[in-house]
Amino acid sequence: MQLFNKEQYLLIDVANCYGLDKLSWNERIDWTKSNLNDLENLAEKADAPCMYRCSVKALRDHYAGIPSGYGIHLDATASGTQWLSILTGDRSGASLCNVLNTGKREDSYTIIHNAILEESGTTSNITRDQVKKAIMTSLYGSTKRPKELFGSDLPLFEKVMSQCLPEAWQFNKVLSGPAWDATADSYHWVLPDNFHAGFKVKALVQHEFTFKGNTVAYFVKEQMPQPNGRALGANLIHSIDGFIVREMVQRCSFSNNRAKEVLAGSTSFIGSTEDILQCLTLWNLYKESGFLSARILNYIYSNTINLVDIDKIKELINELPKKTFEILPIHDSFTALPAYGNDVRQQYIYLMYHMAKSNMINFLGHQIGIQAEWVKPEDFSEEILNSEYALS
C-alpha cells in the first residue's frame, strides 16, 4: 500500500472532489499541484463544487499553517461488489473493484459497461451511469432497473454479469431465488459483533371502509409470508456494510488500555457478569463465523482473558492504529483528518482480509435458512493485504 503524508492526502482530496477519483494516486497529486494557482477558479467545473471548495480551502490553510480540522474523504470503490466478491471467493469480481491490486485504479462500472458494448457488438446509447444503476440494484436482487434499461436485451446484461462476477452473481441469484422461504414472515441473523439484523416480510392487503354510503378501498402493508421475495440480498449485504462501519469506528477510535494491561499480566481488572457473557458471546460468534470482531476488546478483563485465545487477541491489538483517532463514516465513505489517511486505508484492508479468511458466507447463509455449504473456488485472502485502491 502506498503511504502518503498529510499534504499529499489533501492534494488527493482536492482531485477527488473535482471528480478525478478514478485516476491513480500520483496522477491526482500531480493534477492538483499543476493547477495549484488556479484551483478556486475550477470550482464550477467540479463534480461536487461545495466539497471541492472546502477541500481547496483546507489545502490553502495547510500551506498557511492554519489548523482547519478538515477531514479527507476515502470512498469504497463499489462496496457491494467488494463484499460479495470477498464472501464468495470471486477473483474476477475482487479484481474489478480493487479488492485485489491489478496495478491500477479499476472502475468496475466502466469495465462492465464496456463489456456490454463489446458483447452487443454495437455502439449503444446506454451510458456508463445508466449501467451503474442497473448493476448496483441487480446485485441487491432487483430486476426492475435492468429490465427498464435493457428490455429484450436483458439476457445480454445477465450474461456479462455472470462473466465479470461469476461467483458473486451466482450467489446473488441464490439470494433472490431458492434461498427465499415462502413460509417465513421474517428473517433474523446475527453479525460477529453480536449486532442483530433482520426484516419483516410484508405484503399489501386491501381493506375497505364505508363513508356516507360510499365504499372506499385502501391498502396496508401487513406482515405475512410471501411466495417470492428479493429482499434477502439487499438486507444481507447492507448488514455487512453496517458491520464494517462499526468495525472501522471501533478499530480507529479504540483507546482502552485495559486490554493491553491484562495481556501484560495485570489481575486488577475484574469484569461483571455481563462482561463475561458478552465476551463469551463474541468469542463464540468468532468461532462460528471465523471473523473476530474488535468489539471483544471492550470485554477483556482479568477474569475473561482465559475465555479466549490470547494470541488472537494480541494479533487483533497489533493490527490497530498506533494512535487512535476519530472517523466519520457515511455508508462506505470514511472521513478522517488527513494525517490518518494511511490508517483508514490499512484498517479497511485488514477487514477485507479477515472477511476473506472467514466463513461468513455460510455463517450468515445458515441463519437465513440456506442449508448447502458455499465452497469458495480459491483463497486469495493474502493477496488482499496488497490492495491499493479499495478505498479511493
Image: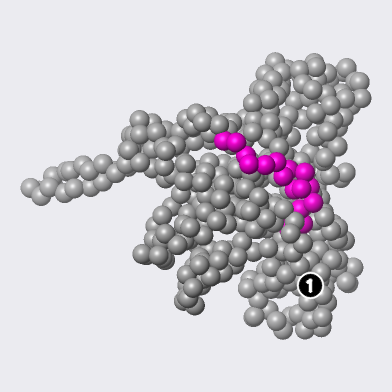
> Can you see residue 293?
yes
Where, quadrant-wise, is the C terminus in this rendering? bottom right
In the rendered image, the vertical position of residue 156 relative to residue 273, given as above or below: below
In the rendered image, the vertical position of residue 35 relative to residue 350, given as above or below: below
Instruction: Give the residue displayed 72% in from the left and 44% down from the top.
Output: 380
The residue at the far left in this view is 213
Within-10-Å neighbours for mark 1: few <14, some 14–19, many 20+: some
Where, quadrant-wise, is the N terminus in this rendering? bottom right
In the rendered image, the vertical position of residue 189 relative to residue 139, given as above or below: above
Q: Foreground residue, 339 or 109?
A: 109
Q: Foreground residue, 283 or 164?
A: 164
Residue 140 picture location, percent across and down: 49, 50
> Can you see residue 304?
no
Residue 390, magenta (yes or no): yes
Q: Is residue 348 left or right of residue 222?
A: right
In magenta, the rendered stretch is: 374-391
Instruction: Give the residue displayed 57% in from the left and 53% down from the top.
Output: 165
Q: Is residue 277 left or right of residue 372?
A: right
Residue 363 picture location, percent across and down: 59, 31
* Secondary structure beneath label 1: helix
Q: Is residue 227 left or right of residue 237?
A: left
Residue 387, magenta (yes or no): yes
